[in-house]
Amino acid sequence: MIIKNTRMWEAINVLVYGEKDVRTRVSIACAILDKMNVKELPEDLQKRIEKVKNEAGKKGELRNINGDVIKDRYEYTSATRQNKTYSKLAKELYDIYNELNTR
């Protein structure tokens, strides 16, 4: 199989083989995808990835009184949401990855 985007592959690898619950794995995958240049992907897939990242990081960052980040947006949001929500996000990321590799 030809890997068309290394960051996307790394994110999917975390989803499939990572430890802990699905919320943690999706949070890590989204942090990896933040480092990806989404312009490398087709526009429809860009939008779908952004939608997943926005849903996974809905609450924004948790900062202390000095403005330092205590928890990133994915970690902070995942602490208050259910595993089934993140299972859907993981499935969507996997579907995007499969679609990217079949084009």
Image: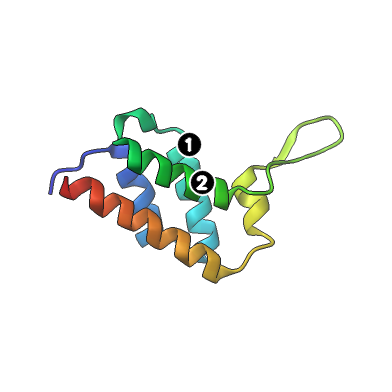
Q: Residue at 12% x, 49% y: name it.
A: 1
Pointer 1 local density, CA inside 10 Å: few below 14, some 14–19, many at least 20? some
Q: Determine contact: label 1, label 2, CB under 8 Å.
A: yes
Q: Secondary structure at mark 1?
A: helix
Question: Which amino acid type corresponds to the residue marked 1 in the rendered image?
Answer: Asp
Q: Is residue 92 left or right of residue 63?
A: left
Query: Outermost residue, front direction?
Result: 44
Which of pointers 1 and 2 indicates the residue nearer the eye? 2
Q: Is residue 18 visible?
A: no
Pointer 2 local density, CA inside 10 Å: few below 14, some 14–19, many at least 20? many
Percent coordinates x, y for residue 14 in the rendering = 39, 54
> 44 or 12, which lies in front?
44
Percent coordinates x, y for residue 96 in the rendering = 32, 51
Q: Is residue 58 visible?
A: yes
Q: Residue at 38% x, 48% y: name it.
A: 11
Q: Secondary structure at mark 2?
A: helix
* Residue on which disc 1 sits: 34
Q: Residue at 44% x, 41% y: name it.
A: 32
Which badge, 1 or 2, comes first in the chain's sequence? 1
Q: Is residue 4 left or right of residue 50?
A: left
Where residue 39 sits, quadrant-wise, is top left
Question: Which amino acid type corresponds to the residue marked 2 in the rendered image?
Answer: Lys
> 42 or 57, which lies in front?
42
> 5 or 98, which lies in front?
98
* Residue on which disc 2 sits: 53
Marks 1/2: CA–CA distance: 8 Å
